[in-house]
Amino acid sequence: MTSTAGTQIPDLRVRGLGFQVGGVEILEDIDLEVPSGHFLGIIGPNGAGKSTLLNLLSGLLHPTAGTIELEGRQINGLGPFRRAQLGVGRTFQTSSLFATLSVFENARLSAEARLGGAKRFWHRPSLDDEASTVARDALEVVGLTHLAQWPSASLSHGDKRKLELAILVAQDARLLLLDEPMAGVNTEDVPGLTDLIRQLHSDGRTVLMVEHHMAVVVGLVETIAVLDSGRLLAQGSPDEIVANDEVQRAYLGQPL
Ligand SMILES: Nc1ncnc2c1ncn2[C@@H]1O[C@H](COP(=O)(O)OP(=O)(O)O)[C@@H](O)[C@H]1O
Ligand SMILES: [Mg+2]
């Protein structure tokens, strides 16, 4: 890994990224640069390729063209677990919690995975204590301490989203990849969730958030990238994107 004097290495750099399935181009020639501490929103109509992009960035899928660099290191070949160890945390469009486990246990599993619990051959109480402390702190950050002992299935959609974010905190993720975090959440829970995401960002994390609804994105993100039919249509400030004719056309018939 090299760096030119005075040039900061971005947390994430994507060059010429492409993904093909059965001859169909799902994503094509995507270039993105996300500096450390930045908040990037990704919008685009349904089927544009937003979730596929997050699958490529989190290692669930591997690109058929281009490169993904994390802090200057090429990570194309690494799977989700290795990327998580490098600080990449991802949430899904639909909830991905262990339904029968408690809120605390969900957070604790994440802490254990980070602390090396999965590789343990013998019981180490000190590590258990550490994982529990990390999990408790993460629940505190997202405001779910009072629900720690409830099964995660009993939570409201909004609180499930908060728990998914607690899992990323427990994992010590520094680059958050959020796929439509407001999906399925009651309207009255959206402001609280928005505030929480804003706080996770201002605590020093880099955020890349996919969101279908423009209203949520504006006011939260610093720049917006627009995907349409697998291609990057535009990138700019929220104001620039709202005023962009091409973006308006891509959203024709849909609320921007
Ligand atoms: N594994 C796959 N095989 C074939 N087509 C896929 C696969 N995954 C996604 N697609 C297609 O790729 C396009 C982009 O999907 P997706 O990334 O889920 O879009 P978005 O999240 O923007 O709604 C869609 O046309 C979808 O049908
Ligand atoms: Mg999607």
Image (cartoon, rainbow, N blue to C red):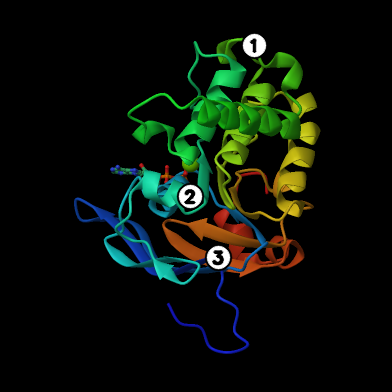
Q: Residue at x 38, y 49 (%)?
A: 82
Q: Are the two marked residues, 3 and 1, in contact with CB atoms closer than 8 angstroms?
A: no
Query: x%, y% of residue 167?
Result: 57, 33
Query: x%, y% of residue 130?
Result: 59, 32
Three-letter residue code for mark 2:
Lys
Q: CA distance from mark 3 to mark 2?
A: 19 Å
Q: Are the two marked residues, 1 and 2, in contact with CB atoms closer than 8 angstroms?
A: no
For the residues carrying marks 1 and 2, which lies nearer the camera in this image? 1
Name the foreground residue: 99 vs 239: 99
Q: Residue at x 74, y 51 (%)?
A: 203
Above or below, 236 against 160 in this view is below
Q: Quadrant of the N terminus?
A: bottom left
Reading the image, the residue beneath label 2 is 50
Secondary-structure class at tag 1: loop
Residue 206: image quadrant is: bottom right
Q: CA distance from mark 3 to mark 1?
A: 36 Å
Badge 3 crowding class, 10 Å Cα cut-off, few under 14, some 14 to 19, many 20 or more, is: many
Task: Give the residue at the far left of this rendering.
Answer: 22
Reading the image, the residue beneath label 1 is 149
Say whether disc 3 or disc 1 marks the residue closer to the N-terminus.
3
Reading the image, the residue beneath label 3 is 11
Q: Tag on residue 242?
A: none
Q: Residue at x 38, y 32 (%)?
A: 118
Q: CA distance from mark 1 to mark 2?
A: 34 Å
Say whether disc 3 or disc 2 marks the residue closer to the N-terminus.
3
Secondary-structure class at tag 2: helix
Q: Is residue 17 left or right of residue 128?
A: left
Name the foreground residue: 193 vs 78: 78
